[in-house]
């Protein structure tokens, strides 16, 4: 039977292992409009418009509106991407959804880690010492899926 200090240390150790595993699960980070445009052009999902007059019109609209345009959601510098690159908005939305799905998977994996850590702590506090030590050993090697 573990003593109270041993149980406290055991739980602290579980917390350390959990923190280490959680820190390895990195959130997927967003990409800049420039990076999205470059990647989309490289893989053929985003294309230059076939009519160069549309590009000229977009530039004229930006230059002629008298507003000071700053970086925004659909802008590359001071020029609106929509008029410059066909398929950019759809590709950007596809990447956003993919990123959200990947981040959701990471959150689910973290929740599994926390749940397993709590289960091991419960066994350590209320179950057998041997079972708790076996679970700790398995938890150290456990890979979240």
Image: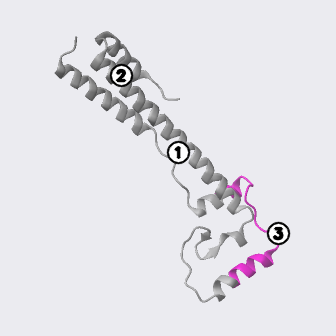
Reply yes or no: does residue 53 show up in magenta.
yes
Number of marks present in the image shown: 3
Residue neighbourhood size for the residue with mark 1, other residues' Cα within 10 Å, grouped as few (<14), some (14–19), many (≥20): some
The question of residue 116 being in magenta is answered with no
- Foreground pick, 32 / 145: 145
Q: Residue furthest right?
A: 51
At horizontal 54% and vertical 72% (from top left) the residue drawn is 71
Residue shown at the point (33%, 16%) measured from the top left? 132
Q: CA distance from mark 2 to mark 3?
A: 62 Å
Please provide percent x and percent y for residue 101. Answer: 59, 44
Q: Quadrant of residue 13?
A: top left
Quadrant housing the N terminus: top left
Where on the picture, by quarter, is residue 31?
Answer: bottom right
The label shown at residue 103 is 1
The residue that label 3 is drawn on is 50
Q: Position of residue 136 (x, y in %)?
A: 35, 19
Q: Would you say 21 lies left or right of 3 here?
A: right
Residue identifier under label 2: 120
The span picked out in magenta is: 39-60
Residue 78 placement: quadrant = bottom right
**Near-viewer residue (98 or 44):** 98
Seen as rendered, the residue at the extreme front is: 126
- The x and y percentages for residue 92 are 65, 58
Distance (Cα) linking label 1 and label 2 = 26 Å
Position above or below: 56 against 132: below
How crowded is the residue under tag 3: few (<14 C-alpha within 10 Å), some, or many (20+)? few
Residue 79 position (above or below residue 88): below
């Amino acid at each position: 039977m573990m003593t109270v200090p041993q149980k406290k240390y055991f739980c602290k150790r579980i917390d350390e292992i959990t923190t280490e595993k959680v820190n390895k699960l990195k959130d997927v980070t967003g990409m800049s409009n420039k990076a999205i445009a470059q990647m989309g052009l490289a893989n053929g999902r985003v294309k230059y418009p076939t009519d160069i007059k549309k590009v000229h019109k977009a530039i004229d609209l930006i230059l002629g509106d008298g507003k000071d345009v700053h970086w925004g959601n659909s802008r590359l510098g001071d020029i609106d991407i929509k008029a410059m690159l066909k398929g950019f908005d759809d590709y950007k939305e596809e990447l956003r959804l993919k990123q959200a799905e990947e981040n959701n998977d990471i959150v689910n994996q973290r929740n599994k880690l926390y749940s397993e850590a709590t289960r091991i702590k419960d066994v350590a506090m209320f179950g057998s010492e041997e079972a708790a030590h076996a679970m700790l050993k398995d938890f150290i090697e456990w890979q979240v899926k």
